Image (tube, helix red, strand yellow):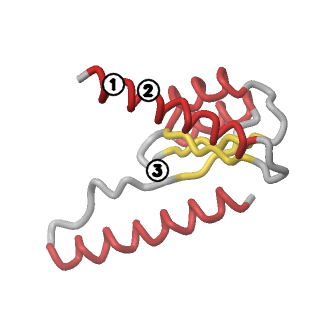
Amino acid sequence: MKRNLSSSCAASIAGLFLLCACAASAKPLDILTSFYPMYVSVLNVVGDTPGVEVTCLTEPQYPAKSAKVIERETGVRLSVLDPAVTGPRDPAAARDSYLAAMRKNLDVLRRALSE
């Protein structure tokens, strides 16, 4: 048991060193966070670190007014990502609706990571 724990700790430390090495590259680091509490936590960690861009993913069912206030007050980049948890009751229509939502989400993620 102790051997597995030691191996896990060593792997975690190696991963942290790898992340630090990647952060030193000239390409900016894009971080996508899920919704407001996680976004604030990420901002508290990264602060004003140069080369780090943070985007907050919101959901379409949440009030847009709240998102606009957060955007205005913090300067956050927002992207709307649909969890597609609701849709038509008809199974065929639901499948098509879900696939359409996932395709739209893929486009949102591509744009968010390329800005």
At a point 80% along the width and 53% down the height, the residue shown is: 27
Q: Position of residue 11 (x, y in %)?
A: 47, 35
Is the residue under label 2 in contact with that under label 1 (CB below 8 Å)?
Answer: yes
Q: Could you tell me which secondary element the residue under label 1 belongs to?
A: helix
The image quadrant that residue 33 belongs to is top right
Alpha carbon separation for disc pair 1 and 2: 6 Å
At a point 51% along the width and 44% down the height, the residue shown is: 58
The residue at which mark 2 appears reads as: 9
Q: In this view, does 105 lie above or below 11?
A: below
Q: Position of residue 8 (x, y in %)?
A: 39, 31
The residue at which mark 3 appears reads as: 60
The residue at which mark 1 appears reads as: 5
Q: In this view, does 55 lie to the left or right of 23?
A: left
The kind of residue on which mark 3 rests is: Pro
Mark closest to the chain's N terminus, 3 or 1: 1
In front of the other: 45 or 37: 45
